[in-house]
Amino acid sequence: MPTRRAPAGFERQRALSITLPGATEDVKWGADIVHSVGGKMFAVYLPDDAGVARSCCFKVDDERFLELTAVPGVIPAPYLARAKWVQVKQDHGLAAADLDALVCRSHALVAAGLTKKLQRELGLL
């Protein structure tokens, strides 16, 4: 009888996020895993009771917001949609490589909003 594999959640993207230049990780709002650059959030991972990221939120380009929220399993992020953030649920219609690229783009968008001085200090320039 074949063994059923549990879904991996968003651990791949969480591991990628922390490798991006200047990225930090901390826990906010009780249990949410937040990745920031220069003190500004660029990705939030929402864990289940076992600590596995089962949903993630990140900033997207303004012009991609409507396109992405039309993808199954991608919704406007609660509390952050006005800033063009999306939430990707466990059962989503994005390829892993596309999700990786979106997380990297979120980092770039947030980093671009930092002061030039801070960007230099973080090695982003």
Image: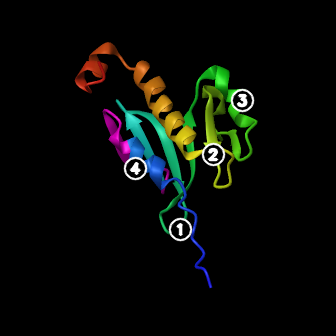
SS label for mark 4? helix
Q: Is residue 112 above or below residue 15?
A: above
Q: Distance between the residues labelled 2 and 3?
A: 13 Å
Magenta-tinted stretch: 18-31
Residue at x 53%, y 41% (from the top left corner) = 97
Dot placed on the residue nearer the N-terminal end, 3 or 1: 1
Q: Which amino acid does label 3 sit on?
A: Glu
Q: Are marks 2 and 3 in contact (CB under 8 Å)?
A: no
Q: Mark 4 points at which residue?
A: 15
Q: What residue type is labelled 1?
A: Asp
Dot placed on the residue nearer the N-terminal end, 4 or 1: 4
Q: Name the residue under label 3.
A: 67
**Residue 72 in picture, x, y percent from top left:** 74, 45
Residue 33 shows up from this direction:
no
Residue 69 shows up from this direction:
yes
Q: Do the residues labelled 3 and 4 touch (CB within 8 Å)?
A: no
Q: Distance between the residues labelled 3 and 4?
A: 26 Å
Q: Are marks 1 and 2 in contact (CB under 8 Å)?
A: no
